[in-house]
Image (cartoon, rainbow, N blue to C red):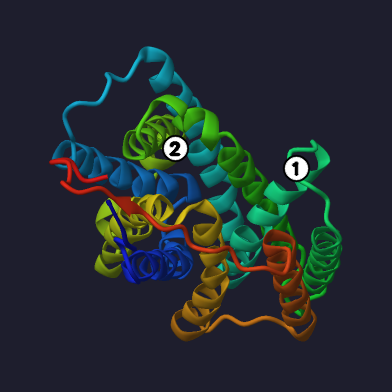
Amino acid sequence: MASTETSGTRPYLLLVTTMLLWGSGFSASKVIVDHLPHSVVATLRFGGGALALLVALRLFRQGGGRRTSARDWARAAGAGVLGVFVYNLLFFWGLSLAPAIDGSTIVPVMSPVLTTTFLLVTGRERASAARVAGLATGAAGAVIFFVGSGGEAGAGQGRLAGDLLFLLSAGCWAAFTLSGRRVLAGIEPLKATTYATLSGSVLLGIYSAPSAAGVVWHDVPAYVWLNVAFVALGPTAVANLLYYRGIRDVGPASASIMMFLVPVVGTTCSALFLGESFGTVQAAGAAVLLVGAVLAVTQGRLPVRRRNVVREPASPRRS
C-alpha cells in the first residue's frame, strides 16, 4: 500500500479556475440584464447550463453505481427550486437595479457567513471566540456597506434595493448549501447538480415566458449573445463541475475558503469592463465584511488538505 498525494496542486488550479469563472460571471450577467428582462436572463443562463450539464452527465456516466431513486431525484429537484429558481430570480432582479460590483461582493461573502451563523445558532458547530468575533465584524461591515449603498450620490434607492435583493439571494444560496449533505446522501454530485439545475431552469422558463414574449429578439446585439453563451457554459456548467471535482480532491473546507477569491475577481472585472466602482463608505464596508467573513469561516486557521490513499494494485475505476 502506498500513500501519496494523488492530485498535487491540480485541484487548487481547478478551484482557482472556478473562482475566476464565477467572479467574471457577475459583470457578464450585468451586460445581458441591461438588454433583456432579468427573469429571461436567468432562464437563458441556467437553461443553457442545464443542457451543458446533461451532456456532461452523458459523457461522464460511470457504470456500477446504484440507480437513482425517485426520492433522490425529488430531493435534488427540490434543492433546485431554492438554489436555482428562487436564488436567481432574486439575484438577477438585484442585478437589474444595482451594479454588478455590489453583487460580486455581497453574494459570495454573505453566503458562507449566513451558513456559518445558522450552524452556530442550531448548535451544529461550536461558537468559538474567533467565529463570534468574525461574525460580529462581518455584520458591522455589512451595515457599513448598506449604509454606503443607500447614500451613494445619484443612486437613489435603486442601488440599496438591489443590494438587499443580493442579500436575500445569498440567504437562498446558504440554505441551498445547508441542504446539500442530505441531497448528496444518495446521489452523485454531478447528477444532483444536473437535476437541480434542470428543475430550477424549467420553473424559470415558465415564470419568464410572459416577459420573453415581449422581447424583440432580432434587436438583441451579438455581444449580448456571446455573454449569454459564456455565462451558461463557463460560470454555470463548467464552474460547477470543477468545483465538485475540487471538493472531492481537497475537501469542502479547503474548497470553501477559495470562495473568497470571487469578490476580488468580480470587483476587478466590474471595474475593468463596466467602469463600476464603490463609494468610499461602501469600499470600507466591503473590506470589513470580507475580513469578518474570512475570520468567521476559517476561525483564524487554514484547513489542512487531506491526502488520498492509493492502493496497489489499482482498481480499474478511478475515485
User: Would you say 268 lies left or right of 239 here?
Assistant: right
Tell me the residue at 41%/20% (across/down). 72
Residue at 56% x, 43% y is 87
Residue 313, how many percent across, how many down?
A: 15, 46
In the image, residue 51 above or below residue 73: below
Please provide percent x and percent y for residue 136. Answer: 86, 62
Q: Nearer the viewer, residue 4 or 192?
A: 4
Q: For the point 44% across and 41% down, which residue is it? A: 211
Judged by depth in the image, the label closer to the viewer, 1 or 2, is 1
Amino acid residing under circle 2: Ser
Q: Tell me if mark 1 has few (under 14), some (14-19) or many (20+) residues whose alpha carbon lies within 10 angstroms of its own.
A: some
Q: Is residue 280 visible?
A: yes
Residue 293 x %, y %? 71, 65
Query: Which is nearer the eye, 224 or 219?
Result: 224
Q: Which residue does the numbered mark 1 point to in the structure image? A: 118
Observer-nearest residue: 189 or 52?
A: 189
Q: Kindly indicate the quadrant of the structure image that contains residue 14.
A: bottom left
Which tag, 1 or 2, sits closer to the chain's start?
Answer: 1
Count of numbered circles on the image:
2
Q: Amino acid at mark 1?
A: Phe
Of 241 and 42, nearer the camera is 241
Which part of the image, by quadrant, shows the C terminus? Answer: top left
Determine which of the numbered discs, if any, sits on residue 208 in the image: 2
Q: Quadrant of residue 82?
A: top right
Q: Is residue 277 left or right of residue 72?
A: right
Q: Is residue 81 visible?
A: no
Q: How far across and down, in percent of the image, does residue 12 sit? A: 39, 68
Q: Is disc 1 placed on a helix, strand or loop?
A: helix
Distance from label 1 to label 2 (Cα)?
32 Å
Mark 2 packing: few (<14 Cα in 10 Å), some, or many (20+)? Answer: many
